[in-house]
Amino acid sequence: MNEPAPGSAMLSLKRPAPDDLPAFAGLDVRRVTIGRLDEQVAVHVAGALGGGRLPLLCVAGLTRNMADFAEFATLFQRGFEPGWPVVLVDLKGRGRASDRFDRREYLSTIDARDLLEVLAALAIDSAVLVGQGYGGQVAMALAAAYPRTVSGAVLIDAGPVSDPRGLVRLRSNLTELDGARGQAGYRSMFRRLLAADYPGVPETDHDRLAGRTHFLDKRQRVHALFDRALVDLLKPFEHDDILVPSWAYFDALAHAPLLLLRTQLTEQLRRETFEEMLRRRPDAEGFLIEGQGSPALLATPEDVGPIVDFMRKVTKRKPKG
């Protein structure tokens, strides 16, 4: 990795991300050093790699981490095949990965390069990518640069362009959370922010979602499970921005089977963009996950079922029973 130019913004690599948080229960990780010796990606492998089985590689959203896929991994293996390899990744700056020394390198193309290194470290030649939001953009960037590594893709609330309204709302929510104090304030603020995205979901589930991106220390101070520099990336956006789609990145998946999922209440991917993606890829299947926003919870067999069916088609495996 090239050293940053003089005057570039540097960040401390130290960020508290305890392994013993409830959100990380059952998600033991190995850390893969990529680039600088003090920069690492965190990886959890559910199931067993090898044996000719095509693994799933899951990447979460911009400020999110592998905890978003904890329930998914279990449900997928239950519906598809026990022990099937599912790899969960915390990109640099997220979860239990280290932060980047140079904030200018928080780019989908560089994160894609890091994913290539993760695949090499795990001796994986090719995988089916499952990406939520920004994770889907990284999957497209990987396919554009290293097409042979992508044998299929599942994009969830992800496309060639993000909805600026969702970016502004994410920025506002994360900034507001900086003002939370103590357990009561932290919990009530999260429940209010999440209520619109998950109507009808018990407040205890809101608390679990909150625990995937933030935690309270012993002094009841709120800490983010991501590099704050990622929030700074959202500062330039406004509600009425018109962003130019990068269709070339979406088209980079032309060689691979594709499944497109969109949550009903998302503000990350416009409905018209989703429909255009399906029009450009008539061979792809599209599904709406009702009653949820971003990230998709992927916590029921019904939500995970389309991905199970998709993998059966990719691997040509017959349904159980």
Image (cartoon, helix red, strand yellow):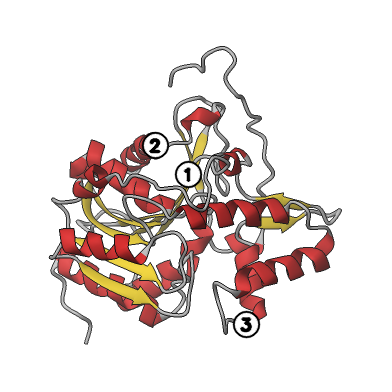
**How many numbered callouts?**
3
Near mark 2 (Cα within 10 A), the count class, few <14, some 14-19 or many ≥20, is many
Quadrant of residue 114 within the rendered picture: top left
Amino acid identity at mark 3: Pro
SS under mark 3: loop
Is residue 83 visible in this depiction of the protein? Answer: no
**Numbered label attached to residue 91:** 1
Instruction: Tell me if residue 177 comes above or below residue 108 in the rendering.
Output: below
Q: Looking at this rendering, what residue extends furthest in the right direction?
A: 219
In the picture of the structure, the residue carrying the numbered disc 3 is 202
**Reading the chain from its start, which is encountered first: label 1 or label 3?**
1
- Mark 1: secondary structure: loop
The answer to whether mark 2 and mark 1 are in CB contact below 8 A is yes
Q: Residue at x 66, y 79 (%)?
A: 203
Residue ranking furthest to the front: 240
Q: Where residue 269 appears, x then y in whole percent? A: 39, 60
Which residue is located at x 65 percent, y 67 percent? 193
Query: Whole-percent x and y of residue 26?
Result: 55, 63
Residue 238 position within the rendered picture, expressed as x and y whole percent measured from the top left: 53, 48
Residue count near mark 1 (Cα–Cα under 10 Å), binned few <14, some 14–19, many ≥20: many
Quadrant of the image for the C terminus?
bottom left
Q: What kind of residue is marked 2? A: Asp
Question: Can residue 292 be seen in this snapshot?
Answer: yes
State the SS at label 2.
helix
Comparing 157 with 2, the one in front is 157
| Left-right relation of 113 to 106 | left
Question: Residue drawn 45% across and 68% down?
Answer: 296
Cα distance in 3D space between marks 1 and 3: 29 Å
Q: Position of residue 176 (x, y in %)?
A: 71, 55
Residue identified by numbered label 2: 114
Q: Nearer the viewer, mark 3 or mark 2?
A: 3
The tag earlier along the polypeptide, 2 or 1, is 1
